[in-house]
Amino acid sequence: MALKSPAADALQESRRLREENTRLATENDRLTKQRAAADSANAPPDAVAVNAQVNPGFMDRLHILAELKDEGLANVAVQVINKGNGKLQARFVELFNLTPAEKTTLDQAVEQARQQTEQLFAANAKVSRRADGAVMISVAATDDGNAVQETLMNAFAQTLGPDRNAAFLALQSNGAIRLGSALGEFGTQPRTITLSHVSSPDGTKTTISLLDEQQIASGGVTTSTTSVPKPASIPANLRWALPLLPSDF
């Protein structure tokens, strides 16, 4: 029987050690990834904002937008809320690098603010009828909306974190972001909604025309007009007015 030489034994041992090192490296990599996933899942809420800022590129974009608006080099308008569904606009989510969890948190805060504002609208509304049958809903301004706005702004501040919130406030202060306009200025400004029946030229079809005139904090007025086939089709952001309509409208 042939005897193994010391060199052969050393080669075999070296091969075994390399295989063991490879196995240990693979296992270590697996455990590291597993630990990182667990840490991410258990991260405190305030750590989410920090994780969202790993890529600093989006902060540069925010600063550039603010500078362009400040210097009058561009007409910057960042829509925060989709009036159709009341959720954050996709562009805003992308611009501020929001994580899914952050978006959910802010969507919930916006929805709460919307419900509270609509309650203020209904509580401060007066309904009158014009001679042509049109219905006018006049909503008086109320300072109670300031508390609603403050709560929502605090939610943005806590979710965005210091850096992103500073950019958010800068864009809001120069008018690039108008958070309040999508929520009726939180009821802090007067508003008038006029609903009237409009017949088609041949008289075979009748629709409802809605004229929404909303005063904004800067002193201007925003005006929007919508046409719907029946009261039940009124846009979601005006549904609070449905119970105020006369039964014969």
Image (cartoon, rainbow, N blue to C red):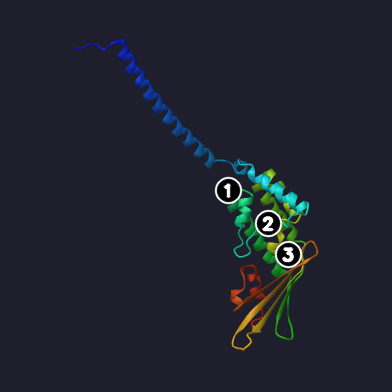
Which percent across, then down, holds residue 5?
Answer: 28, 11
Residue at position x 60%, y 59% from top? 87
The Cα atoms of the two marked residues, 1 and 2, are separated by: 19 Å
Location of residue 237 with respect to 24 vertically, above or below? below
Mark 2 or 3: the one toward you? 2
Residue at position x 71%, y 60% from top? 180
Which image quarter: residue 222? Answer: bottom right
The Cα atoms of the two marked residues, 3 and 1, are separated by: 30 Å
Q: Quadrant of the N terminus?
A: top left
Q: Residue furthest left?
A: 1
Which percent across, then down, holds residue 71?
Answer: 78, 52
Q: What's the residue type where badge 2 is placed? A: Val
The local secondary structure at tag 1 comes to loop
Q: What's the residue type where badge 1 is placed? A: Thr
Which is more N-terminal, label 2 or label 1? Answer: 2
Residue ID for mark 2: 78
The local secondary structure at tag 2 comes to loop
Which image quarter: residue 229? Answer: bottom right
The Cα atoms of the two marked residues, 2 and 3, are separated by: 21 Å
Which percent across, then down, holds residue 83?
Answer: 63, 64
Mark 1 or 2: the one toward you? 2
* Residue 187 image label: 3
Residue neighbourhood size for the residue with mark 1, other residues' Cα within 10 Å, grouped as few (<14), some (14–19), many (≥20):
some
* Residue 99 image label: 1
Q: Indicate left or right for 72 with 78 as reference.
A: right
Which percent across, then down, holds residue 191?
Answer: 74, 70
